[in-house]
Amino acid sequence: MIFFRKKDAKENDLVQEQSFSDSGKTGETHSQERCGCPPFGLRPPCPPRHCCCTGPTGATGATGVTGPTGATGPAGAAGATGATGPTGATGPTGATGPAGGPTGATGPTGATGATGPAGAAGATGATGPAGAAGATGATGPTGATGPAGAAGATGATGPTGATGPTGPTGAAGATGATGPTGATGVTGPTGAAGTAAPASYLSAYSTPAQTGTTGTMLIFDRNASSAGTDITHEQNSPQVTVQTPGYYEISFHGTVGPSGGVTFPATVGVYLEQQGTEVPGAAVQHTFQTSTDTANLSFSQIAEVQSAPAVFQVSGQGDAYFYGGVTLTVQKIGEIS
């Protein structure tokens, strides 16, 4: 084994220690052999050697022959790419060296030459993406109608749709002809006799002639007959008072004529009032042509009395007139249900 001493004594000792370790000897044996002689046995005298203790480092020996190049180690991981530095200014073109000499540095790039002729057309590139759809153009004129195609086969009947809402009721039809009258049924038994309602009436009159003008209320100075308490009248009074609600029939008749001093033709009339309001359908009048004319006036009407007491009276209408032989009869005919 050949050992080469290096500058670092410690490294040299390590190399020697490693060498002895490879031969299988203990550390103590190594140390003794380094000093020159083995511990035991007879051997020829060893050449003089330094003591086992390390002395001062000697002068560096001559560099030994370079050993063979070791095998290339695995490539280390690629470091991060550094930022690209700015491009330096192009240097001037160097002079041409003699033939066979080293190649000079590359000169600056010359001016761009004239454009050469166009090269052959390259292969068509891949189709680009479709552009956005353009606006729809105006509708063209309708073409002529083509001939009708042959009728297709009838398709299967689809399912019945849902029932739609009921339509509006139609107008009523004309009334049908009246059917024949049915046979008369058997007459039922006669019902029990009803109880007659108690009579309720009052009659008032005036015999002597009296005069009046428009708005005069006719006076009845006597009461002829009466029954019940529903109707009352004070003698020499124009008013008849109904004391209970119900339906009442009111009748009037009497003789009237024009008084002196009127202009002819002259019209005289009488009408019935209920609570100061004229009762519809209860009015009568006559037109006179001379002062000797007279006329019999009368009316009859049914009045409803909802609130009692209610006052009825007969009023006259005309410039000047007389009346006599007048009678007013009021009779209750029913109750308000």
Image: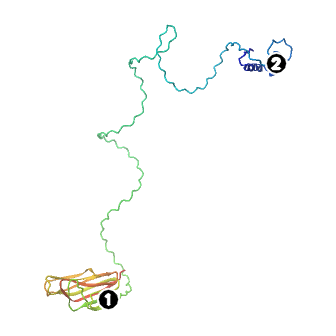
- For badge 1, the amino acid type reads Thr
Q: What amino acid type should be assigned to the residue bearing mark 2?
A: Gln
Q: Which of the 4 quarters of the picture holds residue 186?
A: bottom left
Answer with the quarter of the image where residue 210 lies. bottom left
Please tell me which residue lies in front, 183 or 151.
151
In the rendered view, tell whether residue 86 sits above or below residue 64: below
Q: Residue 32, labelled with which disc?
A: 2
Q: Is residue 5 left or right of residue 257?
A: right
In the image, residue 218 sits, relative to residue 101, either above or below, namely below
Residue 94 location (% of width, % of height): 48, 13
Coloring scheme of the render?
A: rainbow
The residue positioned 80% from the left and 22% from the top of the image is: 27
Q: Secondary structure at mark 1?
A: strand
Instruction: Locate residue 97 relative to residue 190 in the image: left or right.
Output: right
> Are discs 2 and 1 less than 8 Å apart at CB?
no
Q: Which residue is mark 1?
A: 232
Depicted 285 relative to depicted 153: above or below: below
